[in-house]
Amino acid sequence: MALSIPASLESQLDELVTHYPQKRSASLMFLHALQEHFGYVSNDAVEWTAAKLGLQPINVYELVTFYPMFRQEPLGKTHVKVCRTLSCALAGSSEIRDHFCKKLGLNSHAHTPQTTPDGKFTVEFVECLADCGSAPVVMVGESVLSKASIADADRVLAAGR
Amino acid sequence: MSNPATTTPAPAPAVPPPVEKIRIKVDGREIDVPKMMPNWQGKLEPTTMLQACHMAGQEVPHYCYHPKLPVAGNCRMCLVEFGTPMIGPDRKPVLNEDGSPKIARSVLPYEPQTPRGAIACATPISPGMELYPNSPATKQMREAVLESLLINHPLDCPICDQAGECKLQEYSVQHGQSASRFVEEKVHKPKAVDLGPRIVLDDERCVLCTRCIRFTKDIAGDDALGIINRGSYNTISAFPGRAFDNNYTLNTVDLCPVGALTSKDFRFKMRVWFLKETKSLCTSCGTGCNITIGSREGVIHRYEPRENNAVNGPWMCDAGRLNYKWVGRKDRLTEVQSRGQRTTWATAIKEISERLASATPGSTAIIASARQTTEELYLLKRLATRLGAVTDSVPRAGNADRLLVCDDRNPNSQGARLTGITFTELGIQLAWIADGIRNGSIRHLVVFGEDVTQQGIGADLLGKLETLIASDILPNATTARAAFVLPGCAAAEKRGTFINVKGRVQRFEKAAEAPGDARPEWEVLHELVEKVTGSTGFTTIEGLFNQMAKDVPALAGLEWGKLGDTGVTVAI
């Protein structure tokens, strides 16, 4: 896949590099911007970033694989993030994730984000979403689902299908 | 004749800079160690605990530390318990009752009963410091680190190529436990990853020491490897779709302290404990990298670099390392032949010596190879002097790189120059020899180790000769037309010396027997020179070298025994 970066984005990124004493320091900002634009960070995007910053692709690839917020695959249309940090774990978040996985035919033992083959859903465990008082917490896209239940999960599934 | 001044003088003792020493104790024994020591680039840096222990004769186990790589300090295997002199509130040393300084052992800040080690590879020593590389606490720390490194290790030694030269195995014997306490499921990582054309990676065996990453980035200059993923999923990898393919990749196999990086060429071929190790030299270019040949029952299985900081350090290039297969080729010349008929060495040497001795002076030409040993070139030169023969050799040019590979692809061009076989520039007489054959002034041609048909002396010219004597290892167009064919030896099958492009005279030993009738060229030449010139000489390579050192001005003062394993540099 050939990568096409809009000129406006490229000039924005070029300007960004000037904020740092070393070009390399702009790596994460590049990756955020590219993920925002394309929805995920492809290997082409990694190579493009490396070339822009005078790095080898492996240097950038290390970052992409290290940080869970960067995705190497396109997301499903509905992105479900289930918190697994202490409060939510105690409040039963893993049952909710298992329910999502079971209904969508995904592997609940995998530790990476799982996307359905039809591209409609991505389900993953994440660390604290900073709403421990209303555990278990689930985020669907950008909206927070407090005190989530199996019934909430079914509603999300129905809406996304 | 001999001029000792031409050999490099011992470094002039021009006021040696005073070495500042620090007095420390290692396992209770006092030792003075230099305050500063060379780091991986040779620059002076504060001496580390690991270096100090080494000087005190105590080896500290380690995986990630390598003297020729930047210090990473990530494997934690070299943890050593230590203590420093106590300082009182008055900033004066606190003394014991006997007047000796009181030592405060390093402990955890909020757990003073628990010793706190320091990684010996990256911790500088200080005056009065005490190191305890054999204390119970140090041993316990090592055991704990080793156990943790083995948690996700597959423990597949019986099918692992590293077995027998594996640091995990070695340290497990010293510091390990016989059984694993780990009851959870191990993390599974990629197996048999095709990292590049010459390297296979087993990520489950990896201890993440990052030696390979540091080598390829900082030494080879190809930043191709990295650690991807996080935590216990950490995995050594190249960028997807990019092969780990520079001319130095196989050094990472040597560097890898475990069985993670293996050589495609060597893996599953031979258990390392069966290999006989022979000190030898790489013959692929003029650098003359020192190597260890691993062979078993006369079959060469691998070349490995042998450390020589005056030449190659601990590295060698992949091209040179893999350039050994031709030695075992099935079509090697194995028979002495006289006019197409098999004969014996004695008969052939007698016939050749009579033919050459009766030749008109000046009617013989000798084309030697700069792949031959210095001793052989010296003998050929003596033969040439007696016969009034013109001599030359064949240049072999290639591209140099910034690390080890030299643009001169002959291992012994300097040997050819210093023995007088060639002028400064190799090959300038070849056209003259071709003309001589054409106009009939050269009637006899002796060729060693070269195919002259590739050098402007074609089959038509060879056909005009009265005598063509060719010695080689593999058949070629010249040996096919020779009246006398003398099967020769690869460097791995004989002893001798090469002189590298910088004038390093280095010797090499014999790893394997030559096939069939093939004999070391120097033995054959020695007999031939004896018969033609009537002089007798030494019959051992040591004696021959020492005699050559007396006759060749540039080598004056050298002796075989003085060359040692790493050679001597002469002025060129």
Image (cartoon, rainbow, N blue to C red):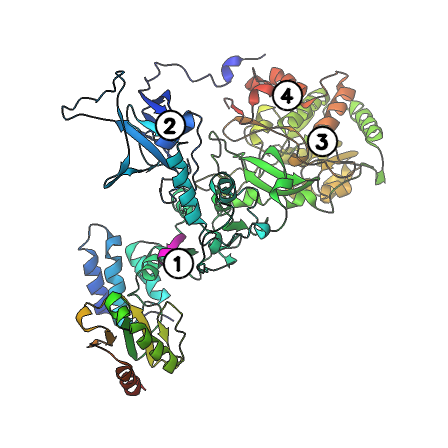
Callout in the foreground (1, 3) = 1
Q: CA distance from mark 4 to mark 3?
A: 15 Å
Instruction: Tell if the residue under mark 2 belongs to the same chain as the one under mark 4.
Output: yes
Quadrant the N terminus of chain B occupies: top right
Residue position for label 4: B545
Most foreground residue, A52 or B128: B128
Instruction: Provide the residue span drawn in magenta.
Output: B225-232
Residue type indicated by callout 4: Phe
Q: Earlier in the sequence, mark 1 or mark 4?
A: 1
Instruction: Tell if the residue under mark 4 belongs to the same chain as the one under mark 3.
Output: yes
Q: Is residue B139 magenta?
A: no
The image quadrant of residue B187 is: bottom left
Callout in the foreground (3, 2) = 2
Q: Position of residue B461 (x, y in %)?
A: 73, 40
Residue pictured at 54% horizontal, 25% vertical: B567
Callout in the foreground (1, 4) = 1
Residue position for label 3: B520
Instruction: Tell if the residue under mark 3 belongs to the same chain as the one under mark 2.
Output: yes
The image quadrant of residue A152 is: bottom left
Residue pictured at 57% horizontal, 24% vertical: B418
Q: Position of residue B368 (x, y in %)?
A: 66, 32
**Tags 1 and 2 in contact by the CB under 8 Å rule?**
no
